[in-house]
């Protein structure tokens, strides 16, 4: 009964969304305030309806109602409650529902807190947003109904893919979706601005928090996914250039570009049509990301063959939204008046270069990800171009960008002083060289790219701190530096933090890919193996029983020159329902490196295949991502972004505005 | 000219979307891989062995009996997925299975095989991808079936799946053995 109510709520939501897409748009065109006002109440109603549907589905999962096909296919009575709940979005239909729920949540947010938005813009943004929701609701109702019933319900469910039964992955999709859908907001603002034919600083000020919020969520989501792959897959790697990872990485890269170009629109009234184009493309990539990850377009060769209706529907959605928006762009963007002029060497110039490089980097990832899809379409299978491709294409594009990151923030708007900026970076250059030398001394010169990576991480780190010190004039007028620091807008702190975070993460990525040590050996209990200066003694392997699995649990005593360091207990779990084994790596972190142990299969003669890794600097990756997320949050809390306070904040921030 | 620049994104998009729409429409069969090399002799190669002591893998040494050549890499996720199938194929059919480690570090490849099991009769390391180019490898994994004269008879782009093995490879190996 509740499932039917949920289904009914979705149908109702579809109808209200239709209303929300049409009436406010017409109202904005005819300047009819009552028609425009429909948008707000409709957005709230849609949110309530979709929330109800979502809760109804969750109810079915928690109660293990196997007469609902989706629950039967993805759940099991013995599954822990957390995974019963995360099972709601651990599948195609449910994840679509989550997507629409977040979309409706953002819409309700605009309706409730967008009071300061110009009425016409608000009506149009909500109408565009409704048009997006309309397509997704139709997709769900016509091809992927989450509430479909089974005529003969099974006694027990099919369980969730064991790999997904993990706290990291339970929250990974919602985070990613917060990001993807966040970019639907910038898309809606871009399309509304194109219809309106006006892009100005106020528009950019409205768009930036959305882009920033989406970026924060996406950064956290990617971090969670990478962390999950690191400890759950048990292969000792944290990034595989897998299509599913790339699908979230592409909107992140281009979203980062959008974040930066929106600054230029806000401060200097330039790069308008480029920013609009970025907003459209980022959402396009978000859509592709959504479909790639959950619909199995790339992961399963036969996804389209088994259900061509879904494939066609997905393509049609992309064509309507992205193709439509690009067509609108082709017609309206030439009429957008260009604003402030600037010299090539200036803050604007640096941000533009940042954008071009990020766009090029996105293009390389796009080609590497979609090329197998093209092959698949023409009849091949899903091949992998893998790290060799990305090392040859992506890395060379990123290197100049990372060097630029140190200089850009020191350039003035309009006309920058490049020699002057470089002069102020002597310390950064010196320390970068020193860091590379130190790495050479510690690790040798076998991996020149790694030395470069360490140097670049140090360069960005010190340059960001230099820029911050310059901004508060720490060395010129140290006495009043504290006061200047307190007056700095939060966005300035945010930028410095985010850049520092990236530097930390780059150091981690460099170390993890260059200096990882790995040994695969066959051990019998009592024997030990030495990896990276630590001894791993296998004390024994026991069999344990989990809620819906049983497992081999190994016990390693890790010692360093006789001194005990840690006990590692990796597991190999066997999930009885889906007959899939999963590995649970055991990880001990020293802060600078991870000691990582995985237990494999028994050899039948009392020995066990074990894999031991020493993963240097991997904790820095997670730490760096965390700092980046914090930077984003600090920036988001800037009062200039806070809804309802833009005018007052502008005056309050004036003393520091020169620097911002 | 200026207008054309604004039109460019939508035109590019139309091109890609049109391509996808067309290829969705056709009833396609993934096993119909157009390969210029089918029916032709496999390219000659001599590749260093996986470990220091191992003999090199030579194309000449493969001749004389039907063989399956699998191109793989330790960094490749689909390879991991197809590995059990490959192991099963070698075990069940008794065919000579050779591996080409593509653009990968020999040590990483050896570790990969130590972990997942080594079904290969011999593995050659194609560090630069040069032999891959001769074979026309799109990416990894790819699998080739060659007859006793070394003529390529079948090619699978992407991971093997049970259906391909049962319906294509096993019957083909059966006829090749006669």
Image (tube, rainbow, N blue to C red):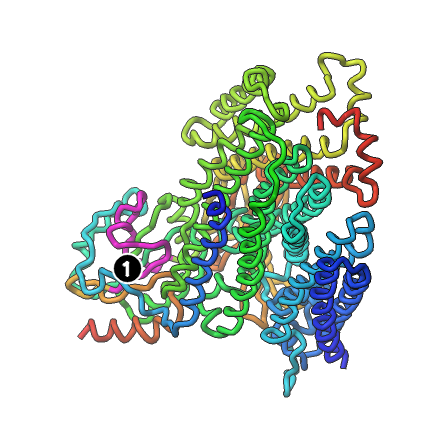
Q: Residue at x 52, y 26 (%)?
A: A455
Taking depth in this image into account, of A284 and A414 the one nearest to the observer is A414
- In the picture, the quarter occupied by the N terminus of chain A is bottom right
Residue A613, placed above or below residue A288: above
Left or right, B138 with reference to A590:
left
Q: Residue extending furthest bottom?
A: A151
Taking depth in this image into account, of A634 and A437 the one nearest to the observer is A634
Callout 1: SS? strand
Q: Which residue is drawn at 41% across and 67% down?
A: B22
Crowding at dot 1, Cα within 10 Å, few <14 / some 14-19 / many 20+, comes out as many
Residue A148, image x and y in percent? 65, 79
Residue B21, image x and y in percent? 45, 66
- Residue A462 visible to the viewer: no
Q: Residue at x 33, y 69 (%)?
A: B31
The region drawn magenta spans B118-145
The chain carrying label 1 is B
Residue A290, placed above or below residue A117: below
Q: Residue at x 54, y 63 (%)?
A: A581
Residue A416, placed above or below residue B121: above
Taking depth in this image into account, of A483 and A458 the one nearest to the observer is A483
Is B143 contained in the magenta span? yes
Taking depth in this image into account, of A304 and A159 the one nearest to the observer is A304
- Residue A486 visible to the viewer: yes
């Amino acid at each position: 009964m509740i499932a039917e109510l949920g289904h009914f709520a979705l149908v109702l939501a579809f109808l209200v969304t239709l209303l929300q897409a049409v009436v406010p748009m017409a109202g904005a065109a005819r300047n009819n305030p009552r028609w425009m006002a429909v948008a707000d109440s409709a957005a709230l109603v849609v949110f309530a309806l979709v929330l109800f549907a979502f809760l109804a589905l969750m109810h079915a999962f928690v109660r293990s109602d196997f007469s609902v096909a989706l629950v039967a296919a993805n759940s099991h009575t013995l599954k822990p409650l957390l995974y019963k709940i995360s099972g709601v979005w651990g599948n195609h239909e449910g994840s679509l529902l989550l997507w629409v729920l977040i979309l409706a949540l953002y819409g309700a947010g605009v309706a409730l807190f967008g009071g300061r938005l110009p009425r016409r813009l608000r009506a149009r943004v909500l109408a565009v947003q409704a048009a997006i929701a309309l397509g997704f609701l139709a997709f769900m109702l016509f091809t992927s109904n989450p509430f479909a019933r089974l005529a003969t319900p099974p006694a027990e469910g099919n369980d969730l893919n064991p790999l997904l039964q993990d706290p990291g992955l339970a929250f990974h999709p919602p985070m990613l979706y917060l990001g993807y859908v966040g970019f639907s907001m910038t898309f809606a603002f871009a399309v509304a601005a194109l219809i309106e034919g006006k892009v100005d600083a106020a528009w950019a000020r409205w768009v930036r928090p959305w882009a920033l919020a989406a970026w924060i969520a996406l950064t956290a989501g990617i971090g969670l996914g990478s962390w999950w792959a690191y400890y759950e897959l048990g292969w000792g790697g944290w990034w595989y250039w897998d299509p599913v990872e790339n699908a979230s990485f592409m909107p992140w890269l281009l979203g980062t570009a959008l974040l930066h170009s929106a600054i230029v629109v806000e401060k200097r009234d330039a790069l308008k049509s480029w920013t609009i184009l970025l907003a459209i493309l980022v959402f396009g990539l978000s859509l592709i990301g959504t479909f790639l990850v959950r619909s199995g377009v790339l992961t399963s060769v036969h996804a389209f063959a088994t259900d061509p209706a879904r494939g066609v529907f997905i393509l049609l959605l992309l064509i309507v939204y992205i193709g439509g928006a690009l067509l609108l762009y082709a017609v309206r963007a030439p009429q957008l008046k260009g604003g402030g002029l600037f010299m090539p060497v200036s803050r604007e110039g640096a941000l533009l270069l940042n954008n071009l490089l990020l766009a090029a980097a996105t293009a390389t990832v796009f080609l590497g990800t979609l090329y197998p899809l093209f092959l698949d379409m023409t009849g091949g299978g899903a091949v992998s171009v893998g790290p060799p491709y990305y090392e040859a294409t992506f890395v060379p594009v990123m290197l100049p960008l990372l060097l630029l990151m140190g200089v850009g923030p020191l350039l003035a708007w309009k006309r920058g002083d490049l020699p002057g900026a470089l002069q102020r970076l002597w310390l950064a250059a010196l320390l970068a060289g020193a860091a590379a030398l130190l790495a050479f001394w510690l690790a040798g010169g076998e991996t020149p790219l790694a030395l470069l990576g360490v140097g670049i991480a140090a360069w960005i780190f010190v340059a960001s701190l230099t820029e911050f010190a310059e901004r508060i004039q720490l060395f010129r007028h140290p006495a009043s530096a504290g006061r200047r620091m307190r007056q700095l807008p939060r966005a300035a702190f945010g930028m410095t933090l985010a850049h520092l975070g990236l530097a930390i993460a780059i150091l981690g990525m460099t170390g993890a890919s260059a200096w990882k040590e790995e040994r695969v050996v066959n051990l019998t209990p009592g024997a030990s193996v030495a990896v990276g200066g630590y001894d791993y003694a296998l004390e024994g392997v026991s069999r344990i029983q989990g809620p819906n699995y049983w497992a081999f649990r190994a016990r390693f005593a890790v010692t360093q020159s006789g001194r005990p360091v840690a006990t590692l207990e990796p597991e190999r779990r066997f999930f009885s329902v889906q007959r899939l084994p999963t590995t649970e790596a055991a990880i001990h972190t020293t802060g600078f490196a991870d000691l990582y142990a995985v237990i494999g299969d028994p050899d039948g003669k009392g020995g066990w295949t074990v894999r031991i890794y020493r993963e240097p600097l991997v904790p820095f990756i997670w730490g760096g991502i965390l700092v980046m997320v914090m930077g984003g949050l600090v920036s988001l809390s800037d009062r200039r972004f806070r809804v309802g306070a833009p005018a007052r904040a502008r005056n309050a921030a004036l003393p520091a505005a020169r620097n911002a | 000219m200026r207008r054309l620049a604004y039109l460019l994104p939508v035109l590019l998009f139309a091109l890609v979307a049109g391509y996808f729409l067309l290829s969705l429409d056709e009833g396609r069969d993934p096993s119909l891989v157009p390969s210029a090399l089918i029916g032709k002799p496999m390219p000659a190669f001599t590749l260093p062995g996986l470990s220091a002591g191992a003999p090199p893998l030579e194309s000449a040494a493969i001749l004389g009996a039907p063989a399956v050549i699998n191109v793989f890499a330790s960094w490749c996720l689909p390879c991991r997925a197809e590995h059990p199938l490959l192991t099963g194929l070698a075990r069940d059919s008794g065919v000579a299975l050779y591996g080409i480690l593509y653009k990968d570090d020999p040590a990483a490849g050896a570790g990969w095989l130590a972990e997942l099991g080594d079904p290969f009769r011999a593995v050659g390391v194609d560090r630069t991808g040069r032999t891959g180019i001769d074979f026309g490898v799109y990416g990894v994994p790819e699998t080739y079936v060659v007859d006793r004269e070394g003529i390529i008879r079948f090619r699978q782009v992407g991971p093997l799946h049970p259906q391909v093995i049962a319906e294509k490879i096993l019957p083909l190996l059966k006829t090749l053995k006669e």
